Amino acid sequence: MSEKQTTKQRLIRKGKKVQEPVNTELVVDISEGFTKDERDLTQPHMGPEFFRVMAWIDEEDEDGTSVVMSFHGFHQFKQRLVFPLDSSSYKYLYIELIRGRSIKNPGTSNGTVVMGRAKIRLPPWTSCGKFTSKCVEIKGYLNLSMKLHRYLEP
């Protein structure tokens, strides 16, 4: 056993807390989603659409999934986004589901349309339980899971 480990064990036995640099990150796994376009329910859907999920806890650290092709409103993402948390002051995870290259509704000059937004309160850093958040209006769903991952700096 190294001298550092022996000293650490001795301090723990004496009831002294050993401070080590701990990093925390928010891990978001995005699995699948569904959206319905209420503007044109009478028309059959023709061809694929392209979707992407954008997420952030800080406006400067926006991240997103890669673009997936979707048929009939069902989207399979199966992707993970990781956000380093350098402060416990982060309170929310912001998420947008974006449809791109839409011929039916160009929205913007490049055809990008925001299909849905969510603002999810992050659990306290000391929380071990599951928490839920209510939605204002349901027009689809996005399955995701979140966890706080803490690790020691090597």
Image (tube, rainbow, N blue to C red):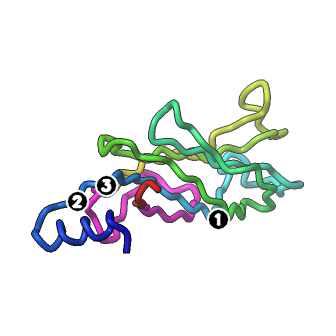
110 to the left or right of 14 = right
Tell me the element at label 3.
loop
Label 1 close to label 2 by CB (< 8 Å): no
144 to the left or right of 37 = left
Q: Is residue 133 magenta?
A: yes
Residue 40 location (% of width, % of height) = 73, 48
Q: Residue at x 17, y 66 (%)?
A: 11
Residue under pointer 1? 32
Q: Which of 143 and 10 is in front in this view?
A: 10
Residue 129 location (% of width, % of height) = 30, 71
Residue under pointer 3? 20
Label 2 close to label 3 by CB (< 8 Å): yes
Pointer 3: residues within 10 angstroms few (<14), some, or many (20+)? few
Pointer 2: residues within 10 angstroms few (<14), some, or many (20+)? few
Give the numbered dot on residue 18. Answer: 2
**The furthest residue to the left:** 14
What span is colored magenta in the figure?
A: 123-149
Three-letter amino acid code at the position of disc 3: Glu
Residue 50 location (% of width, % of height) = 79, 49
Q: Which of 152 and 99 is in front in this view?
A: 152
User: How far apart, in angstroms, are the residues tagged by discs 2 and 3?
Assistant: 6 Å
Q: Which of marks 1 and 3 is in front?
A: 3
| Sequence-first disc among 1 and 2 | 2
Q: Which residue is drawn at 40% across and 53% down?
A: 24
Q: Which residue is drawn at 72% across and 44% down?
A: 99
Tell me the element at label 2.
loop
Quarter of the figure with residue 69 = bottom right
Q: Which residue is drawn at 24% across and 72% down?
A: 9
